[in-house]
Image (cartoon, rainbow, N blue to C red):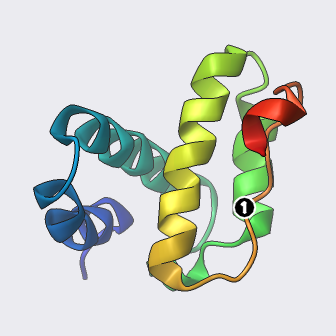
């Protein structure tokens, strides 16, 4: 069974092929870190099982993250949300300026 990180990389193949390469690779790297963390702390076997609960737990575990870094992770999670067809935005990290998230 493929890990969450493998599933992210498989979905990201086409995503990385279009647009700004450096930024998209960084976003995929952030999603792989998130996927590995979620798989270590939750019983999740597929990307479609990742939800608000896992994202909020990730934010709580990484409260010491710099606001700019948290915002970059949030943008990457937003891409994951788009891949999964979610209608609303993922939960934002606490402490990030609301103007950045608009």
| 38 horizontally vs 98: left or right | left
Q: Is residue 76 above or below residue 100?
A: below
Q: Is residue 9 above or below residue 31?
A: below
Q: Residue 5: x percent and y percent? A: 32, 59
Q: Is residue 45 visible?
A: no
Residue depicted at 52% across the width and 73% down the height: 82
Q: Is residue 7 above or below residue 5?
A: below
Question: Considering the image in quadrants, where does the N terminus appear?
Answer: bottom left
Q: Residue 89: x percent and y percent? A: 73, 65
Q: Nearer the viewer, residue 41 or 102?
A: 102
Q: Quadrant of residue 71?
A: top right
Q: Quadrant of residue 100?
A: top right
Q: Residue 72: x percent and y percent? A: 55, 33
Residue depicted at 22% across the width and 41% down the height: 20
Residue depicted at 64% across the width and 82% down the height: 86
Q: Nearer the viewer, residue 86 or 38?
A: 86
Determine the secondary structure under disc 1.
loop
Instruction: Say which residue label 1 marks.
Output: 90
Q: Is residue 13 above or below residue 93?
A: below
Q: Nearer the viewer, residue 72 or 58?
A: 72
Q: Give the tally of numbered discs.
A: 1
Q: Nearer the viewer, residue 88 or 7?
A: 88
Label 1 CA crowd tier, 10 Å (few <14, some 14–19, many 20+): some
Residue depicted at 69% across the width and 45% down the height: 58
């Amino acid at each position: 069974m493929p890990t969450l990180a493998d599933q992210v990389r498989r979905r990201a193949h086409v995503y990385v092929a279009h647009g700004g390469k450096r930024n998209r690779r960084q976003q995929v790297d952030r999603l792989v870190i998130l996927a590995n963390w979620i798989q270590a702390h939750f019983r999740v076997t597929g990307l479609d099982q990742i939800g608000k609960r896992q994202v909020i737990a990730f934010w709580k575990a990484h409260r010491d993250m710099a606001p700019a870094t948290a915002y970059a992770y949030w943008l990457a999670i937003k891409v994951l949300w788009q891949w999964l067809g979610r209608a609303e935005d993922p939960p934002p990290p606490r402490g990030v300026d609301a103007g950045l998230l608009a």
